[in-house]
Amino acid sequence: MPMFSLPVLAALAVVAVVTSFVSGIFGMAGGMLLIGFLLLFLPVPVAMVFHGVIQIAANGWRAWLWRHHVNWNVVLQFGAGAVASLVVFSFFDFVPDKALVLMAVGATPFIALAVPQRIAPNIERGGQAFLAGAIGGAIQLVSGVTGPLLDIFYVRTGMTRQVNVATKAAAQVLGHLTKVIYFGLVIEGPAGRDLEQWLVMGYAAAFAVVGTTLSRSFLDRMSDKQFYHWTRRVILALGAVYIAQGIWLMVTR
């Protein structure tokens, strides 16, 4: 059976729309759903490249839709930190185990929300955007997603929901780009060199743009209080599911 059968392509289109829609509202969570789906039928390096390309499309379009709200100083510092992590990881050719990926993804929201408010980082303070990029870049190359972990740099900034979503989207474009470069070019294997895979990634990216576009009106109607209230609950629920999946995979081997 081919890797990209018609049922898989149909499911991929639906997942791309739904996950980009969710991310368009909350600024995260969609990526966690997407990587979980991709790991069901793709090897880790290929899944990472797919996830990166689709997320670049979704985040890039989201940043464009909210471009007047982007804090570019934060984005540039974040990008510099992410590149620093890419350079370091390039010396190791590290490909994580699927169970490790699932548990790392699931644990990040709990780690993020466990940080006491008095010492919580703030992405707008000097140097912390670079730190977020470096930490996020490292976690990106291990788990494929960083949204829940990076949220600790955003939730106590006083940003409006539009600035939060727009700035994070623009920064995540750079973060996902480092992941595509790492798994598509640095890691040995089929990732990044198969024409069929790139065509399917383009197909999925188009649906990600659709989902992102549909989410805009929902974010407009949501208040800042509702935004932060539901973001925490959605991510913790997803985190618990991913930890359970990772543990199940390890136990059943």
Image (cartoon, helix red, strand yellow):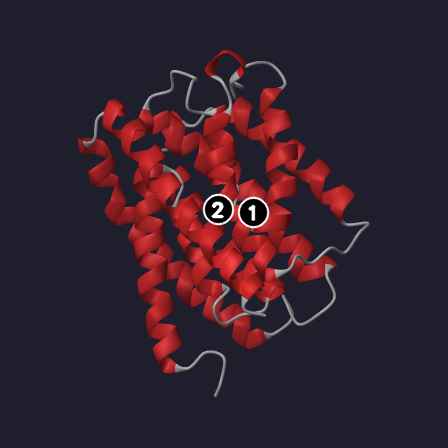
Q: Is residue 129 above or below residue 191?
A: above
> Residue sitting at 38 percent across and 19 percent down?
159
Q: Residue at 72% across / 36% down in the picture?
A: 84
Q: Which residue is mark 1?
A: 104
Above/below status of 20 relative to 158: below
What is the quadrant of residue 182 in the picture?
bottom right
Confirm or deny contact between disc 2 and disc 1 (CB under 8 A).
yes
- In the rendered structure, the answer to whether residue 168 lies left or right of residue 94 reads left
Q: Residue furthest top?
A: 118
Taking depth in this image into account, of 106 and 208 the one nearest to the observer is: 106
- Which quarter of the figure has residue 129? top right
Q: Name the spot of residue 166 as percent of width and height, x first.
A: 40, 33
Element class at badge 2: helix
- Asked whether the viewer can see residue 58, the reply is no
Mark 2 is on which residue type? Gly
Q: Measured from the top left, where is residue 210 in percent x and y?
A: 30, 55
Pick the front one: 204 or 98: 98
Amino acid carrying mark 1 in the image: Ala
Q: Residue at x 26, y 40 (%)?
A: 216
The percent coordinates of residue 5 (x first, y second) are: 41, 82
Q: Which residue is mark 2?
A: 106
